[in-house]
């Protein structure tokens, strides 16, 4: 019952920015957008989350459109270690359940 | 601070047996969630515990159960194992802030 749509895969050149889109057209007013990534066979790693304002941390930036129906995760300078499956998830603040979709498989190439 | 610890990391069981997996959350975190990951179904939510009470449950048969102790450590149990239960089982802990932190998982193989 994932509420997000992501492209299945994308390639990125090492050192370039990677822009990962996500559609969440049915998002509710109290729902946040979360991004996680999973490197092969490891547990998912939290990247960033936001409600309506753009957010930035040491890993990435999150750009949320004004209508909140879509967002973009930006990895500013992709490295080979950023190769992973990236999941965009929508959840409300009082519900700790995460509904994972298929995610986007990002491959960073040298 | 220490992360989420799951034990064991790998497990091989025979069909029909039962198994218990353990998860120690980050200190101070009171919510523990469990997920199953298989190549065919992806990451699926099993259940969530908060202060020893199950708050949320996914769509899994009753063979899958869990509990949480007063120190927030959690266990999940799968009875009458089937081949299809082979999966990576992941535990996540959540504290007062809203992001969940995952353990490295337990890889269960049913033969």
Image: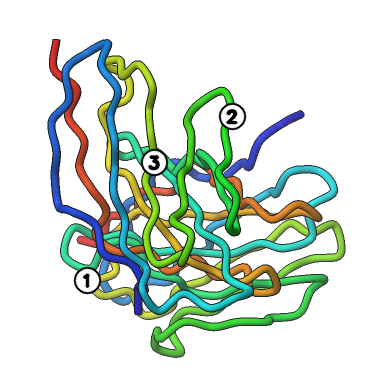
| Placement of A16 over or under B75, stated as above or below | above
Is residue B86 visible in the rendered image? The answer is no
The chain containing the residue under callout 2 comes to A
- Residue identifier under label 2: A57
Label 3 Cα crowd, 10 Å radius (few <14 / some 14-19 / many 20+): many
| Placement of A33 over or under A4, stated as above or below | above
Co-location on one chain, circles 1 and 2:
no
Q: Gap between marks 1 and 2, in whole Å?
A: 39 Å
Q: Residue at left 42%, top 69%?
A: A99
CB under 8 Å between discs 3 and 1? no
Q: For marks 1 and 2, give the one nearer the viewer.
A: 2
Q: Gap between marks 3 and 1, in whole Å?
A: 34 Å
Instruction: Report the colour scheme.
Output: rainbow
Q: Residue at left 40%, top 84%?
A: B60
Nearer the observer, B56 or A1? A1
Task: State the image quarter where residue B18 is shown.
Answer: bottom left
Q: Gap between marks 3 and 2, in whole Å?
A: 11 Å
- Residue identifier under label 3: A73
- Residue identifier under label 1: B84
Q: Describe the element under mark 3 as helix, strand or loop.
A: strand
| Placement of B68 over or under A35, stated as above or below | below
Q: Residue furthest front?
A: A66
Nearer the observer, A99 or A74? A74
Is residue A72 visible in the rendered image? The answer is yes
Nearer the observer, B66 or A91? A91
Disc with the residue nearer the chain's start (3 vs 2): 2
The chain containing the residue under callout 1 comes to B
Q: Residue at left 63%, top 42%?
A: B4
Q: Describe the element under mark 1 as helix, strand or loop.
A: helix
């Amino acid at each position: 019952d994932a509420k997000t749509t992501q492209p299945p895969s994308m390639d990125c050149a090492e050192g370039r920015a990677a822009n990962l889109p996500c559609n969440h057209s049915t998002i509710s007013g109290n729902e946040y957008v979360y991004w996680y990534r999973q490197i092969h066979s490891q547990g998912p790693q939290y990247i960033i989350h936001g409600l309506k304002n753009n957010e930035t941390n040491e890993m990435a930036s999150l750009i949320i459109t004004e209508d909140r129906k879509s967002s973009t995760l930006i990895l500013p300078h992709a490295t080979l270690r950023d190769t992973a499956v990236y999941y965009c998830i929508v959840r409300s603040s009082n519900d700790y359940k995460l509904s994972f979709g298929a995610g986007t498989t990002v491959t960073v190439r040298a | 601070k220490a992360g989420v610890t799951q034990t064991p990391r790998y497990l091989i069981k025979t069909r029909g047996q039962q198994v218990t997996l353990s998860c120690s959350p980050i200190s101070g975190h009171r919510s523990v969630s469990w997920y199953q990951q298989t190549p065919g179904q992806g990451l699926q939510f099993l259940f969530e515990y908060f202060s020893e009470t199950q708050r949320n449950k996914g769509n899994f048969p009753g063979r899958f159960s869990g509990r949480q102790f007063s120190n927030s450590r959690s266990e999940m149990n799968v009875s009458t194992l089937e081949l299809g239960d082979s999966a990576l089982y992941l535990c996540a802990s959540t504290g007062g802030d809203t992001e969940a932190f995952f353990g490295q998982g337990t890889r269960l193989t049913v033969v």
